[in-house]
Image (cartoon, rainbow, N blue to C red):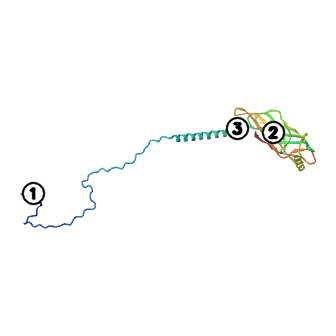
Amino acid sequence: MASHNDSYLSSPPADCVCVWQILPPQPQANNTNPNPNNLEVALPQTLSPAIDTKPKPKTLGDKIGVHWFCMLILILIIVVIIATVLGIYFGNAPRPNLQVYAVFVCPFNISGSYIISKWDFYLLLRNPYHNSFYYSLFDLSLFYKSKFLSGNSIEPFVQPRKDQRAIKVKLDTSSMYVEDRVMEDIIAEKNTGVVKFDLKMKVNIWTRWFSTMDKMKLNIICEDVMVGVPSNTNVGRFLGRPRKCKVKRR
């Protein structure tokens, strides 16, 4: 007895007419569903690399660099402060104003290698500050160019604040020897009627500055003081406007 499976796979019975039709293969759709059962599939996710947010520890070289940079800034600040203080101290320290406003010389004679002359210089000394000045040294010297002719000194004195005073200084060149070259220049200027001289002073002043008593050593120079000396007389007088003198620390 044949099994059910055998009869199913055997040829059809003879009394049945079977028409075999060969059907062409059906084309498959291009968009086949890769997931016909609509199953959810978890796809692997791409993870971004982890970022380390912890600060990196500074190396010894970094610490040394920052230390020296701070030291450099501190040194620059100290230098600027010192320069400012020194500029204020030396630039704005109280000092007098002085000018030559009159000169009289009689006689003014040239004898051989000697100049015989007696001078009266009239100076105007001002103290424009609120501090008093004590003049412990006031030496004056008369020059023709670089040749020293005569000198004198003023006794120490005190000049009150906001004070203005006239000072008369006498100079004498009766015994001053002058070299031939210098004498020739003086004679040449005298023949023009005008001779230029320089009056130089060394002054020491005590005054109060920054709550302390400060001693200032000053050089005062009155350059090109013009004295009119006519060729036919032996008397000379100051020419021009009052001559302002330069005051510098020494």
> Which amino acid does the dot numbered 1 rest on?
His
Which residue is under mark 1? 4
Mark closer to the chain start, 1 or 3 = 1
Report the quarter where the C terminus lies: top right
Q: Position of residue 155 (x, y in %)?
A: 83, 33
Identity of the residue drawn at 83% across and 42% down: 199
The crowd level at tag 1 (other Cα within 10 Å; few <14, some 14-19, many 20+) is: few
Report the quarter where the N terminus lies: bottom left
On screen, residue 202 versus residue 33, left or right, reads right
- The answer, for residue 97, to whether it is visible in the render is no
Q: Position of residue 89 (x, y in %)?
A: 70, 38
Q: CA distance from mark 1 to mark 3?
A: 130 Å
From the viewer's side, name the closer residue of 79 and 52: 52
On screen, residue 192 versus residue 218, left or right, reads right
From the viewer's side, name the closer residue of 19 and 152: 19
Identity of the residue drawn at 59% across and 39% down: 71
Label 2 sits on a secondary structure element that is strand
Which residue is under mark 2? 201
Which residue is under mark 3? 89
